Image: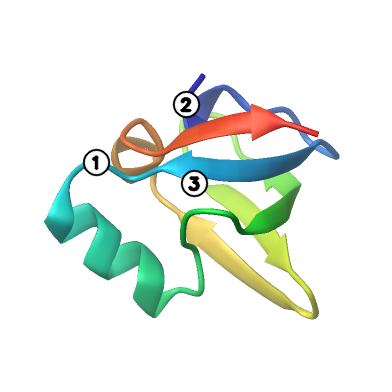
Amino acid sequence: MTLDRVNRGEKVEIVSIPDPNVRAQAIRLGIFEGSQLICAEKLPAGPIILQNRMQEVAVGRRLAQKISINRI
């Protein structure tokens, strides 16, 4: 499953970020393999807002489609 399919309020764990360029972008945002995040908001046709501890990060749909996750 990819990050773009998550629903608001779900807790997810990042499984893999296969593209090295995407991985570098995600790490800058505090998202890496093994991270556990909560979907704070999913805007229609817009970004997915992830909560990582006390920080919220908006991830664009195209980037989210490249990040594999597991629901927790």
Q: Tag on residue 44? A: none
Q: Tag on residue 47? A: 3
Q: Amino acid at mark 3?
A: Pro
The residue depicted at 24 percent of the width and 68 percent of the height is 24
Q: Secondary structure at mark 3?
A: loop
Q: Secondary structure at mark 1?
A: loop
| Residue 59, percent from left and from top | 45, 54
Read off the residue under disc 2.
Answer: 2
Crowding at dot 3, Cα within 10 Å, few <14 / some 14-19 / many 20+, comes out as some
Question: Mark 3 or mark 2: which comes first in sequence?
Answer: 2
Mark nearest the camera among 3 and 2 is 2
Q: For marks 3 and 1, give the CA distance.
A: 20 Å
Q: Amino acid at mark 1?
A: Pro
The residue depicted at 33 percent of the width and 45 percent of the height is 17
Image quadrant holding the C terminus, namely top right
Q: Nearer the viewer, residue 15 or 60?
A: 15
| Residue 49, percent from left and from top | 62, 54
Q: Is residue 42 left or right of residue 1?
A: right
Crowding at dot 2, Cα within 10 Å, few <14 / some 14-19 / many 20+, comes out as some
Read off the residue under disc 1.
Answer: 18
